[in-house]
Image (spheres, grey):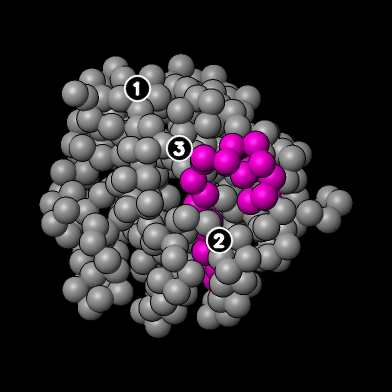
Amino acid sequence: MTRPVIVTCALTGVLTDPAQHPVPVTPDEMAAEAEAAWNAGATIVHLHFRDQSPGCGHLPSWDPAVATAIADAIRARCPQLLLNFTTGVMGDDIAGAVACLEAGRPQLAALNAGTLNYLKLRSNNEWAWPPLVFDNPVEKIEAFAEVMKRVGIVPECECFDTGIVRSVGMFARRGLLSDPVHISLVMGVASGMPADPEWLPLLVREMPAGAQWQVIAIGRTEVWPLHRRALELGGHVRTGLEDTFYLPDGRKARGNGELVDALAGLVVAQGAHVASIAETRAVFGLA
C-alpha cells in the first residue's frame, strides 16, 4: 500500500487585504473555501479569523464569537473536516486566543514554538514593515500547551527556525507535549528558514524520534520543489492562500481548492496517496 499523506489547507492568513487577493473573510466565504479544499483532498483547514466590521477584513480578530461563527459555518458544510485554529498573537496577552480555543473547540491548534524577528526588505532595502518581534517565550508556550491539554486540542508546533525545531524536543522531554509530537516547518519567511529543499534532511534529523511533520512553504515557484522533497522524506504538506497565491505553472490561484488540487496531484505523482479523514484522525490520535 502507498503511504498516506495529510494535506492541510490554510484558508486565509493574517493581514492579506481581501480587496487585493481572493482571501475569504466572512463565515460564508470561509465555509465555501473550506468545502472547496475538502473536495480537493484536504482533511484539515488552518484558520485565522478576521475583523467582520465593514472595510476591516484585512485585520485579525480574537473575538470568540467570530471564531465560533466561522467554525460553525465550516462544520455545517463539512462536518468531517478537522479544524486547526491559529494562536499567533503578539505580546503576553493571550486571553483572546484562549477564548477562541475554548469557544470554538477545534481538534488541532498551532503552538508557535519559539520567538522570531519578523523582517522583510523591499527591493530598495527599506523595511517592508516596521521590524516586528513575534514573541513566544517559554512561559507563553507553556500557557498555550496547558490550555490545549485542558480543552482536548492537539498542538501543532510551528517552527520558523532551526533552534525552534530543536526546542520542541526539549518541550517534549519536559512533559509539555505528548507523543507523537507534531511539527510544522515554516519555510520561506524572509527572516526564518528558507524555502530550500536542501535544508529538509537536516531539519528532520533534529526532530524528536517518531515526530509527525509537515512543511508550510511560503513563497511562489519555490514552494513546489520544497513540497516534493518533503514527500520524498516522509512528511505531510500544507498549502492555501495564507502560504502562496501561485500554482505550479505560475498562474495565480482563484481559490484554495485549486491549490489543494495541485498539491494532491503532487502527492500522487510522488507515489503516495492523499490521506482519508480516518487516516488523518489516526495520525493525530483522534477517536
Q: Residue at x 83, y 56 (%)?
A: 53
Magenta extent: 70-90
Amino acid type at image mark 2: Arg
Assign a secondary structure to mark 3. loop
- Front one among 176 and 160: 176
Image position of 271 (left or right of 264): left
Q: Which mark is residue 266?
A: 1
Q: CA distance from mark 2 to mark 3?
A: 17 Å
Magenta-span inclusion, residue 79: yes
Amino acid type at image mark 1: Leu
Amino acid type at image mark 3: Thr
Vertical arrangement, residue 125 with respect to residue 179, above or below: above
User: Could one spot residue 116 in this view of the protein?
Assistant: no
Q: Which residue is denoted by mark 2 in the rendering?
A: 105
Neighbor class of circle 1 (other Cα within 10 Å; few <14, some 14-19, many 20+) is many
Percent x, y for residue 272?
26, 25
- Sequence-wise, which precedes: disc 2 or disc 3? 3
Q: CA distance from mark 3 to mark 1?
A: 16 Å
